Image (spheres, rainbow, N blue to C red):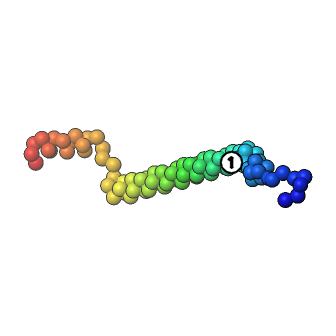
Amino acid sequence: MSSGQKARTPRYFPRMKVRGANRKRMQTMYAFQRLGDAGNASAAAIMGLGSALINMQTAINRMYERQNAVEQLYPPAEPYDMADLGMAIMRGA
């Protein structure tokens, strides 16, 4: 070792000196990552809502199709027909 230089101690090593600075510098990146993750979760929820609404409308359309098919096979009953049916049931016929 030359006469005018001191030995380098660990506190002078760059890795030791900038550990806190690196952590502070990475905070912004981590914040943007969290923001992006939240955006992805929100987008997934919105897309899920859209597909649920589409499925619900499809089910409603199928219900109306079944109703039309049943009404074509069996015309709607009139109130007096229903009354006659009730009386026939009460008579035991």
Identify the residue shown where x is 24% and y is 43%: 82
Is 66 placed left or right of 28 in the picture?
Answer: left
Identify the residue shown where x is 62% and y is 46%: 38
- The furthest residue to the left: 92
Q: Of residues 61 and 39, which is closer to you in this image?
A: 39
- The furthest residue to the right: 4
Where does residue 41 sit, x and y in percent of width and height? 59, 49
Where does residue 93 sit, x and y in percent of width and height? 10, 48
Circle 1 is placed at which residue position? 30
Identify the residue shown where x is 25% and y is 44%: 81
Where does residue 8 sit, x and y in percent of width and height? 80, 53
Residue type, label 1: Tyr
Q: Judge whether residue 31 can be spotted in this image.
A: yes
Q: Residues within 10 Å of mark 1 (few under 14, many from 20)?
A: few
Q: Of residues 72 and 58, which is closer to you in this image?
A: 58
Identify the residue shown where x is 68% and y is 48%: 30
Where does residue 25 sit, x and y in percent of width and height? 75, 46
Image quarter where the N terminus lies is bottom right
Q: Quadrant of residue 2?
A: bottom right
